């Protein structure tokens, strides 16, 4: 069974998501941005790290990116019912 580890940042708007992505691409540390801006508890607790999970444990839009996207790249904005996410896949096994 496939498994992945990822971290994310959750914000309410696509515009906010794009601004944070620009900062990370320019060299800002993902975990620090997550701690400061993410509206998900994982931001404050673990710099956005979600740990390891299998397909079906996250909402579909999130899963689609995590199980097909490039590892180590900041992906998004990804829209879900919770808001807009930046996602970085840290590890994946098939």
Image (tube, helix red, strand yellow):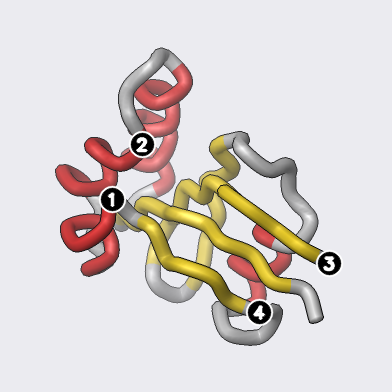
Q: Quadrant of the N terminus?
A: bottom right
Q: Position of residue 31 (x, y in %)?
A: 30, 41
Helix, strand, or loop for circle 3? loop
Please rate how many residues cluster around mark 2, counting C-alpha atoms within 10 Å: few if below 14, some from 14 to 19, many from 20: many
Residue at x 47% of width, y 21% of height: 25
Question: Are the residues at dot 3 and dot 4 in contact (C-beta closer than 8 Å)?
Answer: no
Question: Are the residues at dot 2 and dot 3 in contact (C-beta closer than 8 Å)?
Answer: no
Helix, strand, or loop for circle 4? loop
Where does label 1 land, which residue? 47
Residue at x 59% of width, y 42% of height: 75
Q: Indicate the quadrant where residue 74 lies.
A: top right
Report the Cα–Cα distance between label 1 and label 3.
25 Å
Residue at the outermost top position:
26
Give the mark nearer the N terminus: 1 vs 2. Answer: 2
Where does label 4 land, which residue? 54
Give the mark nearer the N terminus: 1 vs 3. Answer: 1
Report the Cα–Cα distance between label 1 and label 4.
20 Å
Q: Is 45 or 38 nearer to us in this picture?
A: 45
Q: Which mark lies nearer to you, 2 or 3? A: 3
Residue at x 39% of width, y 41% of height: 17
Q: Position of residue 18 (x, y in %)?
A: 43, 34
For residue 94, which numbered disc appears in the image? 3
Give the mark nearer the N terminus: 4 vs 2. Answer: 2
Where does label 2 land, which residue? 30
Helix, strand, or loop for circle 1? loop
Report the Cα–Cα distance between label 1 and label 2.
7 Å
Report the Cα–Cα distance between label 4 and label 2.
23 Å
Question: Are the residues at dot 1 and dot 2 in contact (C-beta closer than 8 Å)?
Answer: yes
């Amino acid at each position: 069974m496939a498994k992945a580890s990822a971290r994310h940042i959750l914000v309410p708007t696509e515009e906010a998501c794009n601004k944070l992505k620009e900062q990370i691409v320019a060299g800002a540390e993902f975990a620090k941005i997550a701690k400061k801006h993410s509206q998900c508890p994982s931001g404050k607790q673990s710099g956005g790290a979600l740990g390891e999970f299998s397909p079906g444990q996250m909402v579909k839009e999130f899963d689609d990116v995590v199980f097909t996207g490039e590892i180590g790249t900041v992906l998004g904005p990804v829209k879900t019912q919770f808001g807009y996410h930046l996602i970085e896949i840290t590890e994946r096994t098939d």
